[in-house]
């Protein structure tokens, strides 16, 4: 059987590749491409601070995020939901980290 070759996929301008999950998790690590605007969201900023504590600043390849894939998907859903509500209603929102969302070291 032939080995799968890892192909580096170029990320479009304005987007960022991230690596989420752990080897212990079903499916292991997963790669996601997110808009750079996420970097300015308070919830994502909390995750970035945790990533810095766990991995430091210097990494090769996609940015590694220390959370489960499920937690990341929930975070992404929350950010997109708030963005949709903001554009729909033009209100200001206060961001609180949901208690169900934990950024544990992978």
Image (cartoon, rainbow, N blue to C red):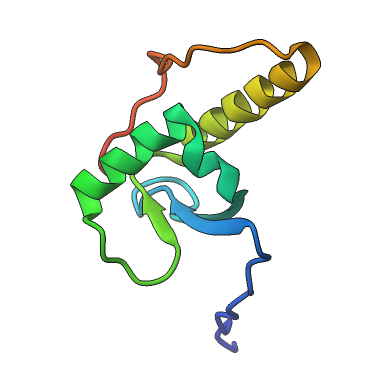
Residue nearest the observer in this picture, 100 or 45: 45
At a point 35% along the width and 54% down the height, the residue shown is: 23
Q: Quadrant of residue 79?
A: top right
**At x 38% / y 55%, what residue is drawn?**
64
Q: Is residue 88 above or below residue 5?
A: above
Residue 11 vertical position relative to residue 22 in the rendered view, above or below: below
| Horizontal and vertical percent position of residue 100 | 41, 17
Q: Position of residue 8 (x, y in %)?
A: 58, 78
Residue 53 horizontal side relative to residue 33, left or right: left
User: Which of the 4 image quarters holds residue 76?
Assistant: top right
Q: Is residue 102 above or below residue 55?
A: above
Is residue 32 visible to the viewer in this orientation of the structure?
Answer: yes
Near-viewer residue (63 or 104)? 63
In depth, the one of 36 and 80 nearer the eye is: 36
Q: Which quadrant is the N terminus positioned in?
A: bottom right
Relative depth, front residue between 80 and 25: 80
- Left or right: residue 103 versus residue 5 is left
Give the residue at the far right of this rendering.
Answer: 88
Residue 51 placement, left or right of 25: left
Q: Residue at x 23, y 54 (%)?
A: 55
Residue 12: x %, y % from top left = 68, 65
Using the image, determine if residue 16 lies above or below residue 100. below
| Left or right placement of residue 18 versus residue 56 in this view | right
Task: Report x, y in % for residue 36.
Answer: 57, 50
């Amino acid at each position: 059987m032939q080995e799968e070759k890892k192909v580096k996929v170029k990320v479009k301008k304005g987007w960022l590749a991230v690596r989420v999950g752990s080897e212990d998790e079903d499916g292991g690590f997963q790669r996601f491409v997110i808009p750079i605007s996420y970097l300015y969201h308070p919830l994502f900023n909390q995750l970035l601070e945790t990533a810095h504590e766990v991995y430091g600043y210097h990494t090769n390849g996609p940015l590694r995020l220390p959370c489960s894939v499920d937690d990341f998907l929930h975070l992404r859903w929350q950010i997109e939901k708030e963005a949709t509500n903001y554009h729909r209603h033009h209100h200001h929102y206060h961001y609180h980290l949901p208690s169900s969302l934990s950024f544990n070291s992978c």
